[in-house]
Image (spheres, grey):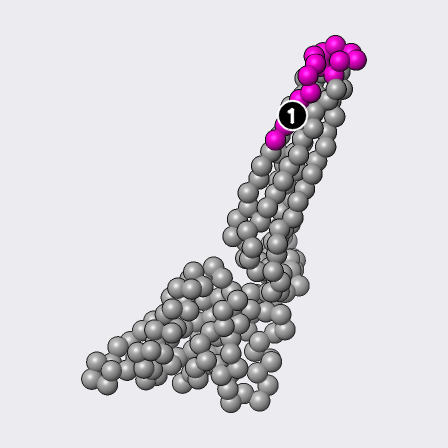
Amino acid sequence: MATFPTLTPSSRTFTPGLHPHSEIPTLSGLQIRVRTSNVLLEQRLRLTFVGLTESEMLGIRSHYIGQQGRFLSFAIPSSLLSGMTTPANFTPTGYSWIYAGPPQVEDIPCAQRYNVSIELVTIPPEGANVNGAEFTVSIALAAGIASIPGNATGADLTVTASIVGGVVADNSSAGFDLTVSISFGDQADYYLDWVIQTYGFEADIYPSWWAS
């Protein structure tokens, strides 16, 4: 997790976030509101830097590119909140930040200085950065005829999943291994399908077998 450059902003604008919820109107005109998460989302911090040197301006640009725009989250240095008596109120425990959009750079040619404006958005602790996954499925059938009782020795199915190293809630994830063993009975045709269930930031992927 790359920390934002240590700079002191000329101005700050903080916008508190919202708890995600759904609003459901009823036929009687009343409204039902259902909260769908216990985390606070979309807290925003708008920062303006006035009179930066070219090196300082390029430091912000390089950080934005290094974070792949809005993809990777990062921590912010205490200098961004300097002068506040209770900066913890603006940086909830466990939360990190992403860019709301690309930095805006104003060039001042006569002074060889730059004014830069950025806007950051909080990411809750449950958020994760996953670079991708690779799945290998290998099936081996033992010799024999599955339709004749006594000769069907079954099949072995091994599913191996590996996750590219990344950051998941500030912890390094080395990946996981999953092994599934399946045995076949006699005199049946078998079919395979994959089932994916998602739960917010998590997903379960598993094979579904059935016989005719």
Q: Compared to 182, does 170 lie above or below?
A: below
Q: Compared to 62, does 109 lie above or below?
A: below
Q: Is residue 23 left or right of residue 103?
A: right
Residue 113 in the image: state x and y as whole percent.
28, 82
Give the extent of the magenta segment. 138-152
Residue 172 in the image: state x and y as whole percent.
60, 60
Q: Compared to 22, does 62 lie above or below?
A: below
| Residue 147, magenta (yes or no) | yes
The quadrant where residue 9 appears? bottom left
Residue 4 in the image: state x and y as whole percent.
47, 74
The quadrant where residue 135 appears? top right
Considering every residue shown, the one lying at the far front of the view is 143
Picture residue at 20% right of the left edge, 84% below the top: 110
User: How many labels sit on residues?
Assistant: 1
Picture residue at 38% right of the left edge, 68% below the top: 62
Residue 203 in the image: state x and y as whole percent.
62, 47
Q: Is residue 181 left or right of residue 82?
A: right
Quick one: label 1, few (<14), some, or many (20+) residues within 10 Å? few
Q: Is residue 69 left or right of residue 134?
A: left
Considering every residue shown, the one lying at the far left of the view is 110
Q: Quadrant of the C terminus?
A: top right
Residue type marked 1: Ala
Task: Identify the residue position indicated by label 1 in the image.
Answer: 140
Picture residue at 49% right of the left edge, 69% below the top: 2
Picture residue at 73% right of the left edge, 22% below the top: 154
Main secondary structure type of the part rendered in magenta? loop
Instruction: Tell me, yes or no, if residue 30 can be seen here.
Output: no
Q: Between residue 186 and residue 121, name the one nearer to us.
A: 186
The quadrant where residue 99 appears? bottom left
